[in-house]
Image (cartoon, rainbow, N blue to C red):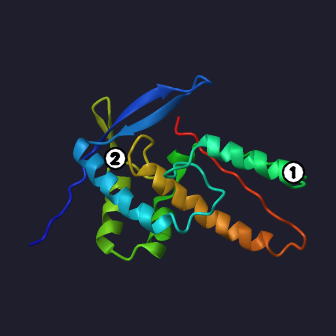
Amino acid sequence: MRASIGVRIGRRKYIAKPDGRQRPLGIAALEDKIAQRALVEVLNAIYEEDFLGFSYGFRPGRSQHDALDALVATITRTKVNWILDADIRSFFDTLSHDWLVRFVEHRVGDPRVIRLIRKWLKAGVMEEGVLTPTEAGTPQGSVASPLLANVYPRQVVFACLGVCRTWKKTTLYQKRYRPSG
């Protein structure tokens, strides 16, 4: 017996951002939300052991308050010369599907899971009766997007830490939080 999950086209809604721009949300069908929630539980079990301790955004049992507490603890107990706060503009909207899938394939060996993630990424959105294909990004508002978005910078941070560790007498403290709004 073989079961397959069909992916439905999501709906596009916009919410206002504080700067006046509009944030696009991808609203998945109920069946996709349920399937994504189940997959997120499985992927969390895989990735939680890989995510570094200074990563707080969209992680189970972690919040922006925890990130701020850790930052305060670091700067009050340790000499800190620099604090860098950076935000990646349109991060969710511009993720490369190909790279994201490659990153997931490093830890997930089941081709059915990879195929399902690809289907969700490529499903497209219905906006005012017009189907728009999805070439990049992961829809903000979907259940799986926060976890998938965390997989992407994890690879970049690992690469950066490999370089930073080669600097003598340099310690890197990072606290990261991406608000969900």
Rendered location of residue 174, percent (x, y): 73, 55
Indicate whether 126 appears above or below 19: below
Q: Amino acid at mark 1?
A: Trp
Quadrant position of residue 53: bottom right
Q: Residue at x 20, y 55 (%)?
A: 6
Foreground tag (1 vs 2): 1
Pointer 1 with pointer 2, Cβ within 8 A: no
In the rendered structure, the answer to whether residue 53 lies left or right of residue 172 reads left
Indicate whether 115 appears above or below 27: below
Q: Which residue is denoted by mark 2 in the rendering?
A: 124
Rendered location of residue 28, percent (x, y): 31, 42
In the rendered structure, the answer to whether residue 128 lies left or right of residue 62 reads left
Q: Is residue 125 visible?
A: yes
Q: Which residue is denoted by mark 1 in the rendering?
A: 82
Tell me the CA gap for discs 1 and 2: 42 Å
Q: Badge 1, how many Cα within 10 Å: few under 14, some, many 20+?
A: few
Rendered location of residue 97, percent (x, y): 46, 59
Quarter that holds the N terminus = bottom left
Q: Amino acid at mark 2?
A: Gly
